[in-house]
Each structure stands twice: as C-alpha cells, then as structure tokens.
Image: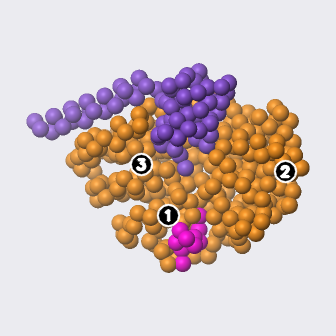
Amino acid sequence: MKHASEYRDKDLSQTLIRRILDMDIRPVRLMEVCGTHTVAIFRSGIRSVLPKNITLISGPGCPVCVTSQAEIDAFISLSNNPEVITVTFGDLMRVPGSFSSLQQEKAKGKDIRMVYSTFDALTMARENPGKQVVFLGVGFETTAPTVAAAVLAAHQTSLANFSVFCAHKLVPPALEALMKTDGVRIDGFLLPGHVSVIIGLDAYRPFVARHHIPCVVAGFEPADILQAVWLLGRQINSGEAPVVENAYPRAVTAEGNKKAREIMSRVFAPTDADWRGIGTIPLSGLQLQPPFDCYDARQRFELRLSNVPPPKGCACGQILTGLKIPPDCALYQKACTPMSPVGPCMVSSEGTCAAYYKYHVEPGF
Amino acid sequence: MCLAIPSRIVEIDGDMGTVDVDGVKREVSLLMIEEPQIGDYVIVHAGFAIKKIDELVAYETLQILRETLALVEKEDER
Ligand code: SF4
C-alpha cells in the first residue's frame, strides 16, 4: 500500500515516540477534530504511548454526531412521505431521533436507501421518475463538494425529482465556537486531514492569528499522527507565535482543492447552523443558493425544524466539546452500547463513545 | 468516515475512472482533480477523487522527516 505503509513503519513511529517522550512539556490538552483521527488514534494505541502530560481529546469531528436532534427528526419525518425515497450514507441509519431512527422506519417499510456516492442518488432519481429522491447532506467540507457536484449534475440534466436536505457543517467556524465555549480548555488542534485537502492550510490562518493556538494538519497513519503531536509539542514549547503546520504535505496544500471549492461555492452559501452540544454557530453551515435553491428539500417538502431536546441523560454534547469523556456519562456501557445506542456518539463508527467502547478504554484513561 | 489509504487510478473514461484500493476496484468521479493519469495515487472520498498524491512531495517530506529525527537523535547523543 503505497503512501500508507511508509507511515506505518515501526522504526519511524518509535523514533517519533522517543522524540515526544523526550520533550519537557507542561500538561497540555490537544484536540483531534476529526472522527477518523479519533478512530485511528484508538486503533493504533497512540494514547497509551504518550507521556501523561499530553492528553488527546476528541472534538466535534464526527458529522453524524454533530447533526442536531431537530435535523435527525426532520430526516425521519421526511422518510414517512410515501412519495419520497430517502437516500443517505450508512452512518446515519441508526442514529436515534426523538421517536424512531431511519433504520426503524426502513424496517417498517419506508423507502430509505444507502449509497456510496451522491451520484448513485442521481441514478436512483433517473430510475424512479414517479418518486422524489432526497439525499440527506450530512458532512463537512470533504463531503459538501460531492453533494454540490450532484446538484450541478441534476441541474445540467434538468433532473426535477432530485433534491438535497442540506445539513452540512464547516470546520473553521466550529473551532472558533469551541474557543468561546465556557470551560473548554484546548492547547492545540490536530486538524482534520481530508477537510484540509479541500479547504487548505490558509483557511485556518485567521483562526490561529485570532486565538494564538498551535494547529497541525495530520494524515491518518500512526507516523502521521505522531508527527503532528510532536510538532504541536514543539510549537507549545518554543514560545513563538503559533502557526498552522502541515504534517500531511503529500495531500494538503496551502490553498486546498480549488476545483472542489469552486463547485461548493457555486452551489452553496454559508448559513448559520445548529450543532449538537454547541448550539447555533454563525455561518457554520451551508444552504443551496439560487439558481440551485429549487433543489432544497426543506423548501420543497416544507420541512420545519422543531426545537427538540437531545436524548435524556446523553452527554454527547459535552463529549463533542471535550468537556467530558464517555465514562463520565452515566449511561455509558449501561443503558447505552453500540447494540442499543442512546446518542449518536455511540452509533457512528467515528463517534467517541463507540471508539471508547470498542477499544475498551477504562475510566480515567 | 475518511478513507485513509490512497487509491490508484487504473482506468479513465471521461470524468469517471476506476480506482484500485488494496485490490478492490471502485468507480469514482475524477471531476475534482486536475489532469488525472492512469497510475496516479488519489485520495477518494464518497466516490470522488479529491486529491492526487504529490509523489515528489511525499518522497521529499518523508526524507526530511527521517533526517530531522536522525539529527535530533544525534544532538541528544552529544
Ligand atoms: S454513552 Fe451514549 S448516552 Fe452517553 S454520551 Fe455517549 S452516546 Fe450519549
């Protein structure tokens, strides 16, 4: 596996671990913002080799987890429309809404289908002219361009029975919101790899300048992540003005993927969005803009988002902001397990609770 | 979920292509990358190639990382 196995090299990782252990560092909390990082960190056991002064905490980087309860409920009510084929990526299926989940609705016979790519949803729309095909657009800047590309293709081919329920979220505004959240203490960010492929290092520079916090973009292999932790430690120790560093240069550039960003900004405009656990963050979401707003499923089906509370007792909100870890939640491993999840953080393969559960991390670890 | 392992382009047909990741073949859109070529390694997300891996940068940065680490180790030995 070219471009992957080099970064799984034991010697390289060992050397990096030694460098990290040699650092004389004050107690710091580093947040990995991306759910795929959370899983990679757990799977490779990186937490257990870090010195006790370096704590890795998981952030709001699992797209399904940050989707608000109101949006989840609206997805489910949409799927009850007999005209509609609801199309989604797999992760969303089991997320509990206030009364049901997409999976439960599917079991009841509702037409809900999982796809691998947004283009599959277009094919479905062409093959089912008598139905309305609605794609549930959940995800960050990595996924949003793929949804935008599908909307563009629908527009070009005048595909009238396709629409998107747009619940996309943007990473830099979420970082801003985290820094302003009461009680949150973060000394550095391990920035997402593939969101950064799209938006580039430049997208984070205003944030770093405003908050004076070290940031390093990381890839997903053990040596990538270790290198990012090492660079964060070096920045913290140097006493110099924090910067955005790139520990994933084989994939991430300063300007990001221009083509993807152009597609995204043609189709979408930023809008305020509700995040689970954080609340409304200004300009942290995307909405379809003219002439593509006719593909907006919320308008087409007059869907309203109601103000609903998250599941009772679920601490996902605090877990997504790093205020709590899963064992702090009274339901963890008791009422809430991957088999019968109470909150989204236990459902999604990228959720922090699911990662804790799967890799058997003891309380206080 | 991000697919961390880069895929190799094995076929190109207009804006679409076939990639091979660890022996599994998949159809992907090549809309978002510049000048895709057969043999290129790309990062794929939800059916779209979103970045060509820069071979030269990949090689050089790995070299530099190794050298930097070796250098730090030597300094420590002194
Ligand atoms: S353990 Fe379950 S209930 Fe508790 S925070 Fe995690 S997902 Fe929510």
Residue range of the region highlighted in magenta in the rendering: A335-344
Chain assignment, label 1: A
Report how far apart the C-alphas of labels 1 and 3 lie in the structure.
24 Å
Task: From the image, tell me which residue sits under label 2.
Answer: A132
Task: From the image, tell me which residue sits under label 1.
Answer: A354
> Is any atom of residue B20 visible in this view?
yes
- The amino acid marked with disc number 2 is Gln
* Near-viewer residue (A258 or A271): A258
Label 2: how many residues lie within 10 Å, few (<14), some (14-19) or many (20+)?
many
Q: Residue at x 64, y 33 (%)?
A: B29
- Coordinates of residue A307 in the picture (x, y in percent): 74, 67
Dominant secondary structure of the magenta stretch?
loop
Callout 3: helix, strand or loop?
strand
Q: Residue at x 87, y 42 (%)?
A: A160
Q: Residue at x 86, y 51 (%)?
A: A131
- Mark 1 CB near ligand 1 (8 Å cut): yes
